[in-house]
Image (cartoon, helix red, strand yellow):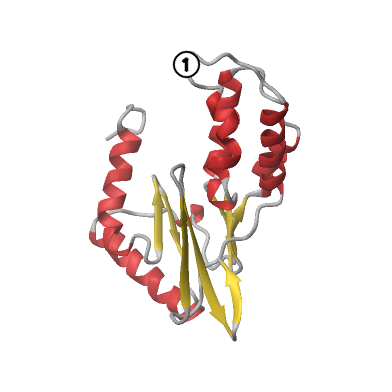
């Protein structure tokens, strides 16, 4: 199928997901024609590369080696930077947030919340913080940007500019899940106990 057709990217993405399905989210992430293979160490990575290359060959899908990067310790992928420490917000994407002016219309709020919402897993309490702004995007609600909305907007910008690095928990012992619920929402925190020290994940 030629790539100029409207449905070509979606069909190709579906093909790649079906081909890589046995290994998706185990050590492979696929986005259209980008394949990201991640591993814990060099030996494991060598095996993962071999598995995926053989899989592509079997399905008669070919990679152009001049467009491939192998054995890189850090990669930018879909607005994130992934390395041995974990996953973080791409600093290049966050630069634009620093100078973002306060929204003056519901459409401008949606644009900001769409951008910020993409990184919501890095922002504790995102829904609660953005609630006052989200209300102004609803039909029939008068647009009245006040101190509450401005404070929420500035807090989201601040949290995005100082977002933490997310990591996978190590080991399989001593995990504790703390839950809190109300009529308005549900919150869950995964805690990992290491050497009798509680680490909030």
Query: With respect to residue 156, does 22 lie above or below?
Result: below
| Disc 1 secondary structure class | loop
- Where residue 34 sits: x, y (%)? 44, 50
Q: Which of 69 and 135 is in front in this view?
A: 135
Q: At 58% across and 36% down in the image, what residue appears?
A: 130
Q: Nearer the viewer, residue 77 or 2?
A: 77
Image quadrant occupied by the N terminus: top left
Residue assigned mark 1: 139
Quadrant of the image occupied by residue 133: top right
Query: With respect to residue 83, does 46 lie above or below?
Result: below
> What is the count of numbered marks?
1
Residue at the extreme front: 183
> Is residue 119 toward the left or the right of residue 12 in the image?
right
Q: Nearer the viewer, residue 123 or 145?
A: 145
Q: Nearer the viewer, residue 57 or 90?
A: 90
- Where residue 199 sits: x, y (%)? 60, 72
- Where residue 118 sits: x, y (%)? 53, 42
Residue at the extreme right: 99
Q: At 34% across and 54% down in the image, what residue appears?
A: 62
Query: With respect to residue 11, does 4 lie above or below?
Result: above
> Is residue 119 toward the left or the right of residue 35 in the image?
right
Image quadrant occupied by the C terminus: bottom right
- Where residue 194 sits: x, y (%)? 57, 82
> Is residue 111 toward the left or the right of residue 62 in the image?
right
Q: At 56% across and 41% down in the image, what residue appears?
A: 128
Residue at the extreme bottom: 195
Quadrant of the image occupied by residue 155: top right
Mark 1 surroundings within 10 Å by alpha-carbon count, few (fewer than 14), some (14 through 19), many (20 or more): few
């Amino acid at each position: 199928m030629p790539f100029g057709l409207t449905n070509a990217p979606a069909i190709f993405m579906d093909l790649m997901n079906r081909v890589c399905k046995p290994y998706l989210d185990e050590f492979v992430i696929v986005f259209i024609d980008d394949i990201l293979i991640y591993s814990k160490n060099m030996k494991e990575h060598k095996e993962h590369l071999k598995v995926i290359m053989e899989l592509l060959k079997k399905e008669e899908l070919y990679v152009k080696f001049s467009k491939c990067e192998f054995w890189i310790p850090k990669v930018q992928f879909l607005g994130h930077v992934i390395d041995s420490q974990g996953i973080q917000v791409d600093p290049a994407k966050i630069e634009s947030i620093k100078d973002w002016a306060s929204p003056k219309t519901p459409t401008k709020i949606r644009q900001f919340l769409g951008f910020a919402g993409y990184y919501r897993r890095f922002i504790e309490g995102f829904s609660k913080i953005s609630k006052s702004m989200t209300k102004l995007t609803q039909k029939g609600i008068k647009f009245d940007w006040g101190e509450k909305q401005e404070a929420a907007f500035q807090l989201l910008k601040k949290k995005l500019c100082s977002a933490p690095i997310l990591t996978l928990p190590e080991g399989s012992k001593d995990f504790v899940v703390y839950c809190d619920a109300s009529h308005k929402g549900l919150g869950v925190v995964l805690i990992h106990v290491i050497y009798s020290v509680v680490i909030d994940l």
